[in-house]
Image (cartoon, grey):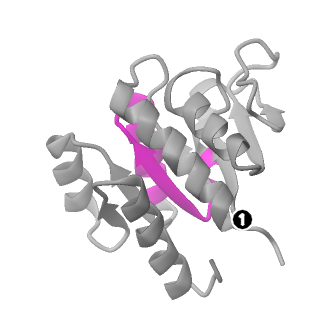
Amino acid sequence: MRKIIIGVMGPGTGASETDWENAYTIGTLIAQEGWVLLTGGRNVGVMDAANRGAKSANGLTVGILPDAGDSGVSDAVHIAIFTDMGSARNNINVLSSDGVIACGMGAGTASEVALALKANKPIVLLTQDRESQRFFQHLSHHHIWIATSPKDAIAFLKQALTRRGKTP
């Protein structure tokens, strides 16, 4: 049986301290569930924090990198996939994930959430940005959940995966 892959998306250099802390906890919780963590793989912001959290809990981490070379890769990425696709790699991030958690919000994160909506993936928004919440909920009430904590985000994904016939 294929392992469940959870994509954690969020700002890189623009991540807040809260985003970083939430991402670290989410990474830890994903690893504790036995799921695989997938991020953009860089050594900044939400990507780095989620990878560090998962690695600290002995989880498997996959990074889908925008460049062809390995500069800027998080030390906590076990499997680095180099795409040389820039932001176009966002579609790979989403399509390779069974569910997506957006931790914080930025332009790249918004593009990943939009791609996840188009792909009918379950999405959890863990952000205090009310405008982002309203915008994405307006686009789809069926695939978007708003979480107030990392534990809530994982609980929402478990429910969504169970409904889709994937055993969490």
In this picture, is 4 found above or below 41? below
Picture residue at 41% right of the left edge, 54% below the top: 150
Q: Does the segment drawn in magenta span residue 100?
A: yes
Instruction: Residue type at mark 1: give it.
Output: Gly
Which residues are the magenta region? 92-117
Residue 91 placement, left or right of 151: right
Q: Does the segment drawn in magenta span residue 122?
A: no
Instruction: State the residue in front, 68 or 159.
Output: 159
Q: Is residue 90 visible?
A: yes
Quadrant that contains the N terminus:
bottom right
Residue 75 placement, left or right of 8: right
Picture residue at 33% right of the left edge, 74% below the top: 142
The residue to which callout 1 is attached is: 34
Q: Is residue 94 visible?
A: no
Picture residue at 37% right of the left edge, 63% below the top: 152
Q: Quadrant of residue 16?
A: top left
In this picture, is 147 found above or below 28? below
